[in-house]
Amino acid sequence: MLNWSEIHTVLLDMDGTLLDLHYDNYFWREHLPRRYAEKHRLPIDAAKSDLLSHYQRKEGSLDWYCVDYWSRTLGMDIAQLKTEVQHLIAVQPQVADFLDYLRYLGKTVCLVTNAHPKSLRLKLDKTALGKHFDRIICAHSVGMPKEQPGFWDQVQAIQPFDKDHCVLIDDSLPVLRAAQRYGMRYLVAITQPDSRQPATPVAEFAAIHRFVEIMPNHPLAR
Protein backbone atom coordinates (compact mmCIF):
# COMPACT_ATOMS: atom_id res chain seq x y z
CA MET A 1 0.00 0.00 0.00
CA LEU A 2 2.79 2.45 0.89
CA ASN A 3 6.32 2.55 -0.44
CA TRP A 4 8.04 4.03 2.59
CA SER A 5 11.19 4.76 0.61
CA GLU A 6 9.18 7.39 -1.32
CA ILE A 7 7.67 9.05 1.77
CA HIS A 8 9.55 11.71 3.70
CA THR A 9 6.78 13.32 5.76
CA VAL A 10 3.95 11.66 7.68
CA LEU A 11 0.93 13.79 8.62
CA LEU A 12 -1.23 12.15 11.27
CA ASP A 13 -4.70 13.01 12.49
CA MET A 14 -5.41 12.53 16.19
CA ASP A 15 -9.06 11.77 17.02
CA GLY A 16 -10.21 8.61 15.28
CA THR A 17 -6.75 7.90 13.90
CA LEU A 18 -4.25 7.78 16.75
CA LEU A 19 -6.91 7.97 19.46
CA ASP A 20 -10.12 6.01 19.79
CA LEU A 21 -13.00 8.23 18.68
CA HIS A 22 -15.24 6.61 21.30
CA TYR A 23 -14.23 9.29 23.82
CA ASP A 24 -15.38 12.15 21.60
CA ASN A 25 -18.51 10.38 20.39
CA TYR A 26 -19.52 9.52 23.94
CA PHE A 27 -18.87 13.04 25.15
CA TRP A 28 -20.92 14.81 22.46
CA ARG A 29 -23.67 12.22 22.12
CA GLU A 30 -24.15 11.10 25.74
CA HIS A 31 -22.26 13.01 28.42
CA LEU A 32 -22.85 16.58 27.27
CA PRO A 33 -26.56 15.94 26.55
CA ARG A 34 -26.95 14.52 30.05
CA ARG A 35 -25.32 17.57 31.64
CA TYR A 36 -27.32 19.88 29.31
CA ALA A 37 -30.54 18.13 30.31
CA GLU A 38 -29.68 18.60 33.99
CA LYS A 39 -28.92 22.28 33.48
CA HIS A 40 -32.18 23.00 31.61
CA ARG A 41 -34.34 20.39 33.35
CA LEU A 42 -35.12 18.67 30.08
CA PRO A 43 -35.82 15.05 29.20
CA ILE A 44 -32.65 13.50 27.80
CA ASP A 45 -34.20 12.98 24.35
CA ALA A 46 -35.16 16.65 24.15
CA ALA A 47 -31.63 17.64 25.18
CA LYS A 48 -30.11 15.42 22.51
CA SER A 49 -32.44 16.84 19.86
CA ASP A 50 -31.64 20.42 20.87
CA LEU A 51 -27.89 19.81 20.80
CA LEU A 52 -28.05 17.91 17.51
CA SER A 53 -29.57 20.94 15.82
CA HIS A 54 -26.66 23.04 17.15
CA TYR A 55 -24.13 20.45 15.94
CA GLN A 56 -25.57 20.25 12.45
CA ARG A 57 -25.37 24.01 11.96
CA LYS A 58 -21.66 24.04 12.80
CA GLU A 59 -20.42 20.70 11.45
CA GLY A 60 -17.24 21.07 9.38
CA SER A 61 -16.54 24.62 10.59
CA LEU A 62 -13.83 25.70 13.02
CA ASP A 63 -16.55 26.47 15.58
CA TRP A 64 -17.57 22.81 15.55
CA TYR A 65 -14.17 21.91 16.99
CA CYS A 66 -13.92 24.92 19.31
CA VAL A 67 -14.30 24.26 23.03
CA ASP A 68 -14.64 28.01 23.74
CA TYR A 69 -17.40 28.41 21.13
CA TRP A 70 -19.49 25.66 22.72
CA SER A 71 -18.83 27.00 26.21
CA ARG A 72 -20.13 30.44 25.16
CA THR A 73 -23.07 29.07 23.17
CA LEU A 74 -24.28 26.58 25.76
CA GLY A 75 -23.25 28.47 28.88
CA MET A 76 -21.32 25.44 30.12
CA ASP A 77 -17.65 24.81 30.84
CA ILE A 78 -16.95 22.31 28.07
CA ALA A 79 -13.28 21.87 28.94
CA GLN A 80 -14.21 20.94 32.50
CA LEU A 81 -16.97 18.60 31.34
CA LYS A 82 -14.50 16.84 29.08
CA THR A 83 -12.31 16.01 32.07
CA GLU A 84 -15.25 14.21 33.69
CA VAL A 85 -14.96 11.39 31.14
CA GLN A 86 -11.22 11.59 30.45
CA HIS A 87 -10.85 7.98 31.56
CA LEU A 88 -12.31 7.09 28.15
CA ILE A 89 -9.37 8.67 26.27
CA ALA A 90 -7.52 5.75 24.71
CA VAL A 91 -4.79 5.20 22.14
CA GLN A 92 -5.72 3.03 19.18
CA PRO A 93 -4.06 -0.42 18.96
CA GLN A 94 -0.50 -0.50 17.56
CA VAL A 95 -0.13 3.30 17.55
CA ALA A 96 2.94 3.31 19.81
CA ASP A 97 4.58 0.65 17.63
CA PHE A 98 3.74 2.60 14.49
CA LEU A 99 5.17 5.85 15.84
CA ASP A 100 8.35 4.03 16.89
CA TYR A 101 8.47 2.48 13.41
CA LEU A 102 8.31 5.91 11.77
CA ARG A 103 11.12 7.15 13.99
CA TYR A 104 13.18 4.09 13.05
CA LEU A 105 12.59 4.89 9.37
CA GLY A 106 13.72 8.47 9.92
CA LYS A 107 10.49 10.12 8.78
CA THR A 108 9.35 13.60 9.72
CA VAL A 109 6.19 13.03 11.77
CA CYS A 110 3.60 15.78 12.30
CA LEU A 111 0.36 15.73 14.21
CA VAL A 112 -2.21 17.73 12.25
CA THR A 113 -5.46 18.10 14.17
CA ASN A 114 -8.73 19.99 14.26
CA ALA A 115 -8.87 19.55 18.03
CA HIS A 116 -9.09 22.70 20.12
CA PRO A 117 -5.90 23.44 22.12
CA LYS A 118 -7.69 22.66 25.40
CA SER A 119 -8.78 19.25 24.12
CA LEU A 120 -5.38 18.66 22.56
CA ARG A 121 -3.60 19.40 25.84
CA LEU A 122 -5.91 17.08 27.79
CA LYS A 123 -5.34 14.22 25.38
CA LEU A 124 -1.58 14.65 25.09
CA ASP A 125 -1.29 14.83 28.88
CA LYS A 126 -3.37 11.66 29.17
CA THR A 127 -1.57 9.66 26.46
CA ALA A 128 2.01 11.07 26.45
CA LEU A 129 2.03 10.87 22.63
CA GLY A 130 3.47 14.37 22.15
CA LYS A 131 7.07 13.17 22.34
CA HIS A 132 6.66 11.29 19.07
CA PHE A 133 6.02 14.34 16.87
CA ASP A 134 8.46 16.67 15.17
CA ARG A 135 5.69 19.27 15.02
CA ILE A 136 2.09 19.66 16.17
CA ILE A 137 -0.16 21.78 13.96
CA CYS A 138 -3.57 22.76 15.31
CA ALA A 139 -6.36 24.06 13.08
CA HIS A 140 -7.18 26.76 15.63
CA SER A 141 -3.69 28.18 15.26
CA VAL A 142 -4.03 28.08 11.48
CA GLY A 143 -7.46 29.71 11.55
CA MET A 144 -9.38 27.14 9.50
CA PRO A 145 -10.25 23.43 9.75
CA LYS A 146 -8.58 20.69 7.74
CA GLU A 147 -11.68 20.35 5.55
CA GLN A 148 -10.77 23.63 3.83
CA PRO A 149 -8.15 23.34 1.05
CA GLY A 150 -6.47 26.55 2.22
CA PHE A 151 -5.52 24.76 5.41
CA TRP A 152 -2.82 22.80 3.60
CA ASP A 153 -1.20 25.97 2.25
CA GLN A 154 -0.89 27.11 5.85
CA VAL A 155 0.64 23.79 6.86
CA GLN A 156 3.19 24.19 4.06
CA ALA A 157 4.19 27.55 5.51
CA ILE A 158 4.66 26.03 8.97
CA GLN A 159 6.17 22.67 8.01
CA PRO A 160 7.17 22.47 4.34
CA PHE A 161 6.54 19.12 2.67
CA ASP A 162 6.61 17.66 -0.83
CA LYS A 163 3.10 16.62 -1.87
CA ASP A 164 4.54 13.69 -3.84
CA HIS A 165 6.54 12.41 -0.86
CA CYS A 166 4.05 12.86 1.94
CA VAL A 167 1.27 10.70 3.42
CA LEU A 168 -1.79 11.87 5.34
CA ILE A 169 -3.53 9.31 7.55
CA ASP A 170 -6.97 10.44 8.72
CA ASP A 171 -10.39 9.01 9.57
CA SER A 172 -12.32 11.91 7.99
CA LEU A 173 -13.29 11.51 4.34
CA PRO A 174 -13.96 15.28 3.92
CA VAL A 175 -10.43 15.97 5.20
CA LEU A 176 -8.91 13.37 2.90
CA ARG A 177 -10.85 14.79 -0.05
CA ALA A 178 -9.56 18.29 0.72
CA ALA A 179 -6.00 16.96 0.84
CA GLN A 180 -6.60 15.11 -2.42
CA ARG A 181 -7.78 18.33 -4.09
CA TYR A 182 -4.66 19.98 -2.77
CA GLY A 183 -2.62 17.38 -4.65
CA MET A 184 -1.34 15.16 -1.86
CA ARG A 185 -0.25 11.87 -3.40
CA TYR A 186 -0.56 9.40 -0.52
CA LEU A 187 -3.79 9.31 1.46
CA VAL A 188 -4.85 6.61 3.91
CA ALA A 189 -8.22 6.31 5.64
CA ILE A 190 -9.01 4.63 8.96
CA THR A 191 -11.91 2.17 8.77
CA GLN A 192 -12.71 1.89 12.50
CA PRO A 193 -12.16 5.24 14.22
CA ASP A 194 -14.52 4.31 17.09
CA SER A 195 -13.75 0.95 18.71
CA ARG A 196 -17.38 0.60 19.84
CA GLN A 197 -18.67 0.91 16.27
CA PRO A 198 -18.18 -1.53 13.38
CA ALA A 199 -15.52 -0.87 10.78
CA THR A 200 -16.78 0.92 7.67
CA PRO A 201 -15.41 -0.01 4.23
CA VAL A 202 -13.75 2.87 2.38
CA ALA A 203 -13.72 2.68 -1.42
CA GLU A 204 -12.27 6.00 -2.54
CA PHE A 205 -8.98 5.87 -0.62
CA ALA A 206 -6.48 3.29 0.51
CA ALA A 207 -7.71 2.24 3.95
CA ILE A 208 -6.47 0.36 6.99
CA HIS A 209 -8.10 -1.24 10.00
CA ARG A 210 -4.88 -1.47 12.03
CA PHE A 211 -1.47 0.18 11.62
CA VAL A 212 0.27 -3.17 11.25
CA GLU A 213 -1.06 -3.17 7.69
CA ILE A 214 1.42 -0.43 6.77
CA MET A 215 4.38 -1.69 8.79
CA PRO A 216 6.11 -4.17 6.44
CA ASN A 217 8.80 -6.33 8.02
CA HIS A 218 7.78 -5.24 11.50
CA PRO A 219 7.45 -8.12 14.05
CA LEU A 220 3.74 -7.33 14.43
CA ALA A 221 3.25 -7.99 10.74
CA ARG A 222 4.60 -11.52 10.90
Image (tube, rainbow, N blue to C red):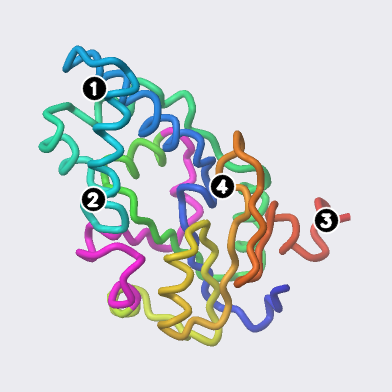
Which residues are drawn in magenta?
A: 126-152
- The picture places residue 176, in percent across and down from the top left corner, at 48, 69
Say if 87 sits above or below 211 in the image.
above
* Residue at 72% over, 64% down: 214
SS for dot 1: helix
Which residue is under mark 4?
Answer: 193
Residue at the disc numbered 2? 57
104 vs 43, nearest the viewer? 43
| Residue labelled with disc 1 | 36
Q: CA distance from mark 1 to mark 3?
A: 45 Å
Q: Residue at x 65, y 42 (%)?
A: 198
**Residue 7 falls in image quadrant:** bottom right
**Pointer 2 local density, CA inside 10 Å: few below 14, some 14–19, many at least 20:** few
Q: CA distance from mark 4 to mark 2?
A: 23 Å
Q: Is residue 56 left or right of residue 217?
A: left
Q: Secondary structure at mark 3?
A: helix
What residue does disc 3 label? 221
Q: CA distance from mark 1 to mark 4?
A: 26 Å
Q: Amino acid at mark 3?
A: Ala
Mark 1 vs mark 3: in front:
1
Q: Which of the two labelled residues, at mark 2 and mark 1, occupies the earlier sequence position? A: 1
The quadrant where residue 3 appears: bottom right
Q: Residue 138 colored magenta?
A: yes
Amino acid on which disc 2 is placed: Arg
The three-letter code of the residue at mark 1 reads Tyr
Q: Secondary structure at mark 4?
A: loop
Residue 46's mark?
none
Work out whether mark 1 precedes mark 3 in sequence or the reverse, and give the earlier one: 1
